[in-house]
Image (spheres, rainbow, N blue to C red):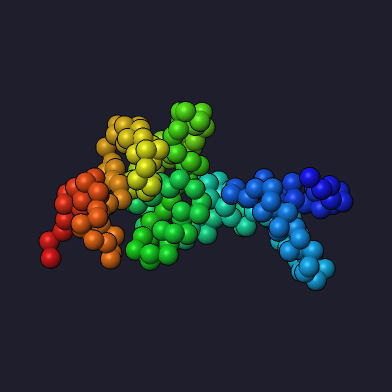
Amino acid sequence: MRRFPEPIQNAAAALARLPGVGPKTALRYVFYLLKQPKADIESVARALVALGERIQTCSRCYTYTAGGGVCEICTDARRDASLLCVVEESRDIATMESTDAYKGLYHVLGGTLNPIEGVTPDALRVRELVERVRADETIREIILAFSPNVQGETTILYLAKQLAPFGRAVTRLARGLPIGASIEYADEVTLGDALKGRRTM
């Protein structure tokens, strides 16, 4: 394999550490950047450096914030403090917010349980969640918003058990047929969940 100058190799190695980016794709990105004006490359570099310097974790919900300390959602007095939505990662908050259907607070767990890969409750923010619910009597419902896969289901069951002693409502996202889907091609689990979650018209 051809050896490239050290700056190209270093940049490709750094980009290859991103999820879904292999060595060939990383090299493709480097050569694309080399064709751009120097000012554009410097702009990308400054943006990446700013991530490390200015972005911190909210001390209350553990999402990312540029303000330091507590994030904008946690400090917004208009939010419904009686609702707490537990999500896997910070990016899930943006997805939930885009629906404009949820006005409560959040807790970022930091992943889902996956014992095969060594992700146990100690590796997640389970203890922080339990302490938050124990300390805050205003929380009346905890919504477990995880993907409907094996890891998400395992995490939901585990958290429901941990939160049960507090006597708060513990709910999960509804599941069922997506808009535009055909019943003919739906699997049994999805169709069963759609039947269980049916609503009055």
Looking at the rendered structure, the number of numbered marks drawn on it comes to 0
Taking depth in this image into account, of 194 and 13 the one nearest to the observer is 13
Please say whether residue 66 is visible from this viewpoint: yes
Q: Is residue 197 above or below residue 43?
A: above
The quadrant of the rendering that contains the N terminus is: top right
Q: Is residue 197 left or right of residue 11?
A: left
Q: Is residue 176 left or right of residue 34?
A: left
Q: Is residue 163 above or below residue 4?
A: above
Please give the name of the residue rendered at 38% of the width and 46% of the height, measured from the top-left corner: 146
Please identify the residue farthest to the front as the structure is shown: 1
Please give the name of the residue rendered at 34% of the width and 39% of the height, measured from the top-left corner: 153
Please give the name of the residue rendered at 30% of the width and 47% of the height, measured from the top-left corner: 172
Q: Position of residue 57 (x, y in %)?
A: 59, 48
Q: Is residue 12 above or below residue 150?
A: below
Q: Position of residue 180 (x, y in %)?
A: 28, 66
Taking depth in this image into account, of 191 and 168 the one nearest to the observer is 191
Please give the name of the residue rendered at 37% of the width and 42% of the height, measured from the top-left corner: 149
Q: Position of residue 75 (x, y in %)?
A: 50, 57
Please say whether residue 122 is visible from this viewpoint: no
Taking depth in this image into account, of 35 and 113 the one nearest to the observer is 35
Taking depth in this image into account, of 74 and 53 the one nearest to the observer is 53
The quadrant of the rendering that contains the C terminus is: bottom left
Q: Is residue 102 above or below residue 150?
A: below
Q: Is residue 129 left or right of residue 70?
A: left
Please identify the residue farthest to the left as the structure is shown: 200
